[in-house]
Image: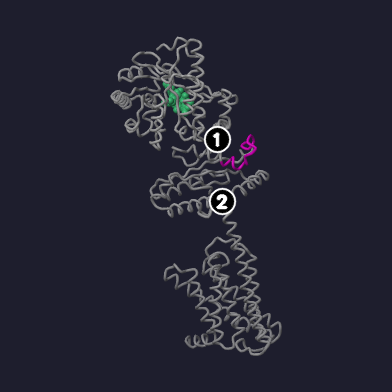
């Protein structure tokens, strides 16, 4: 019975059956190429079952049901009923096909449409059943081939076509036209679909073919324009590596979002600035692709955590954006945990600075050329920087930071004025010769006495200026002011005080002739060179050692002593003694602060070793008599610290010198 039914079914519909098989096969090729065999088999059968073949059967049943009831055979109404009966099951099965394929967007419907159109056209132009079958299959494959790029595009890319109803509309309109056309000959000529054979039939067939060609051309253009447009938008708005937004998108849409929220009193927002720390190692150890994968996953985690926000990647490992303030901290902590879990050797750290946008007017207030958004990004970055060396993942921008940031920007903007108008002053702190119990020299330390912010200590202006390589202006100012002091004191008959002054590594990288400048000042002010010593911190020796060795040699050639500052604060201390010819080493004050047996042993050994090498030693941070007694015992040359004096302005130095 079943075999009998099957034979009848196949012989009557074999064009559609063959096309159904091809349809299922094409589906596997396009969508399930990398699926396992079981899935493939399943999808093949399901695709076949929803193919046009079944639509034909269903529409036949529907049509004959209705027509036998309504007695409309041969009329125009019959044509409408037939077309409706044809299209209804088609749309129904197309919906099922979409579920089977399981991809969003127009791709499944589009593939279905191509097969449908091929079948309809074949019905119109074929003279025999065999011809119809051949044309159907050939045309189906030709259409799929013709649109292979477009199909791939809507299958794989996150195309905006997913949401576009006009796109569906156009395709559906063509389907209805072509489908209805296919029904025409049977009705008009009252003949079977397979056996149309007069001039009228030719006209209908040609119109059908034209319709399909028109469909192809129209869809090709449609796709071309859409793909071009979307690629343009994507290049502009999206970060092509991670799928996050681009900086230009953030600046364009973020500013508008802020303004909208401000105006409508919407939910509070925050700007975030994040970084993945230690990311370089991933690229080096595991390859660029592994790094890109982690960046993309981070972008996904962020966008998933903040669907209402904007997440943009502005460079390398920096993601920046705007998110709702509510629960932002908790969510970022969760994202951080997940990002760190992506770490291939547990080294990655995700760090986020957050700045609530309620501050934006304030932030923009005194910097009119700043857009509020970029200012907020900067502030969030300041907060993120605070996390260095901590175990926390999230840091809010707070009042203390606001104050420091204001000072930082003020310092950067006013360095020249500070030098010119004498805001930058030099304080002096004595170094005591332990053996002689007398002041041997002074360390010259800069102080910024600001008309607006008052007294600023070096930690408020040295690091910001080092970052932009402008600290040399401070260092040369020290020397210049010292020179003037020497001149004044000599005129007043006071003895000259020898000094050491600090230079930074960035002085050598600032693109100025540091040695020439120093030489010029010494010459101009006629300072005897034996009174000037140059301090270079140990950490400044990190990096290119050849540059630093050359610098030390240059200073020696100029006739200046070179002292190493903060010895023991870095990690290469012994190498430093081996590679550089320092005249004095200043032992970092950390050893006096943590004055236990360990520290004492180290200080004792350093002093002995230095003495053996013919290098003098200074202990920094000497605050107690106990410190002093110990240093005397271990043979340290000089002591510097609050025990004798804090750094003081020159007019406070007693005329007859310090008494120790
Ligand atoms: P430094 O060169 O190691 O200077 C010694 C610092 O220790 C000074 O801090 C000084 O006030 C402080 N100090 C001295 N004795 C004691 C003590 O007994 N206890 C404690 N707790 N501290 C003591 P200051 O003046 O704040 O300078 C900090 C750093 O800023 C300096 O460290 C130096 O690296 C840098 N700096 C200061 N002035 C200049 C400058 O004109 N140019 C450059 N490039 N750096 C400077
Ligand atoms: Mg120093
Ligand atoms: Mg020091």
Q: Is residue 545 magenta?
A: no
Residue interval drawn in magenta = 362-377
Q: Residue at x 37, y 24 (%)?
A: 592
Question: Mark 2 or mark 1, which has the lower sequence index?
Answer: 2
Tell me residue 86's x, y (percent). Answer: 62, 79
Between residues 246 and 73, which one lies in front from this camera angle?
246
Q: Residues within 10 Å of mark 1 (few under 14, many from 20)?
A: some
Q: Is residue 68 visible?
A: no
Which of labels 2 and 1 is toward the front?
A: 2
Query: Is most of the magenta stretch helix, strand or loop?
Result: helix
Label drawn at residue 535: none
User: 239 left or right of 631?
Assistant: right
Between residues 96 and 616, which one lies in front from this camera angle?
616
Contact (Cβ within 8 Å) of mark 2 with mark 1: no
Looking at the rendered structure, the secondary structure element under dot 1 is loop
Q: Is residue 370 magenta?
A: yes
Circle 1 residue? 398
Looking at the rendered structure, the secondary structure element under dot 2 is loop
Q: Residue at x 46, y 34 (%)?
A: 506
Gap between marks 2 and 1 measured at Cα: 27 Å
Between residues 205 and 74, which one lies in front from this camera angle?
205
Q: Quadrant of the rendered structure where residue 570 is?
A: top left
Circle 2 residue? 246
Tell me residue 633's x, y (percent). Answer: 30, 18
Between residues 5 and 483, which one lies in front from this camera angle?
483
User: 607 left or right of 84?
Assistant: left
């Amino acid at each position: 019975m079943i075999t009998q039914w099957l034979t009848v079914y196949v012989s009557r519909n074999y064009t559609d059956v063959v096309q159904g098989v091809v349809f299922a096969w094409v589906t596997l090729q396009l969508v399930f190429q990398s699926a396992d065999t079981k899935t493939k088999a399943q999808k093949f059968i399901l695709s076949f079952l929803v193919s046009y073949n079944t639509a034909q059967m269903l529409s036949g049943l529907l049509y004959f049901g209705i027509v036998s009831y309504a007695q409309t055979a041969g009329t125009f109404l019959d044509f409408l009923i037939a077309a409706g009966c044809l299209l209804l099951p088609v749309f129904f099965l197309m919906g099922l096909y979409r579920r089977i394929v399981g991809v969003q967007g127009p791709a499944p419907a589009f593939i279905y449409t191509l097969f449908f159109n091929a079948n309809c056209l074949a019905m119109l132009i074929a003279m025999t059943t065999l011809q119809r079958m051949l044309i159907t299959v050939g045309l189906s494959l030709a259409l799929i081939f013709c649109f292979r790029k477009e199909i791939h595009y809507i299958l794989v890319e996150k195309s905006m076509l997913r949401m576009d109803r006009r796109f569906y509309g156009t395709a559906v309109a063509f389907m209805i036209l072509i489908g209805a056309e296919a029904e025409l000959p049977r009705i008009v000529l009252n003949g079977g679909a397979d056996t149309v054979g007069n001039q009228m039939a030719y006209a209908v067939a040609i119109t059908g073919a034209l319709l399909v060609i028109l469909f192809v051309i129209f869809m090709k253009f449609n796709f071309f324009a859409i793909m071009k447009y979307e690629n343009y938008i994507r290049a502009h708005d999206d970060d092509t590596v991670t799928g996050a937004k681009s900086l230009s998108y953030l600046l364009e849409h973020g500013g508008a979002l802020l303004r909208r929220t401000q105006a409508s009193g919407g939910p509070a927002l925050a700007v975030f600035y994040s970084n993945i720390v230690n990311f370089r190692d991933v690229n080096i150890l595991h390859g660029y692709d592994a790094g890109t994968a982690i960046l993309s996953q981070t972008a996904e985690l962020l966008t998933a955590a903040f669907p209402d926000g904007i997440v943009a990647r502005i460079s390398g490992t920096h993601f920046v954006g705007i998110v709702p303030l509510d629960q932002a901290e908790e969510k970022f902590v969760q994202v951080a945990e997940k990002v760190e879990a992506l770490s291939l050797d547990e080294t990655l750290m995700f760090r986020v600075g957050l700045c609530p946008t309620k501050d934006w007017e304030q932030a923009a207030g005194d910097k009119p050329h700043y857009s509020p958004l970029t200012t907020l990004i900067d502030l969030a970055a300041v907060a993120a920087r605070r996390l260095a060396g901590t175990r926390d993942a999230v840091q809010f921008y707070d009042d203390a930071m606001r104050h420091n940031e204001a000072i930082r920007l003020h310092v950067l903007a006013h360095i020249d004025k500070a030098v010119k108008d004498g805001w930058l002053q030099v304080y002096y702190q004595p170094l005591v010769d332990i053996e002689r119990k007398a002041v041997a020299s002074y360390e010259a330390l800069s102080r910024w006495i600001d008309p607006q912010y008052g007294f600023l200590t070096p930690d408020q202006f040295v690091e910001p200026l080092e970052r932009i390589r402008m600290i040399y202006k401070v260092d040369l100012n020290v020397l210049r002011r010292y020179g003037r002091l020497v001149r004044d004191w000599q005129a007043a008959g006071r003895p000259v005080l020898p000094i050491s002054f600090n230079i930074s590594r960035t002085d050598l990288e600032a693109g100025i002739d540091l040695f020439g400048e120093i030489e010029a000042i010494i010459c101009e002010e006629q300072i005897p060179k034996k009174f000037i010593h140059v301090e270079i911190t140990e950490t400044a020796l990190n990096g290119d050692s050849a540059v630093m060795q050359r610098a030390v040699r240059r200073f020696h050639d100029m006739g200046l002593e070179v002292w190493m500052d903060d010895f023991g604060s870095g990690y290469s201390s012994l190498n430093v003694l081996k590679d550089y010819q320092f005249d004095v080493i200043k032992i970092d004050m950390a050893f006096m602060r943590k004055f236990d047996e360990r520290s004492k042993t180290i200080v004792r050994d350093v002093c002995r070793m230095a003495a053996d090498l013919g290098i003098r030693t200074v202990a920094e941070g000497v605050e107690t008599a106990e410190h002093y007694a110990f240093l005397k015992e271990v043979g340290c040359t000089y002591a510097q610290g609050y025990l004798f004096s804090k750094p003081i302005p020159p007019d406070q130095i007693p005329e007859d010198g310090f008494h120790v």
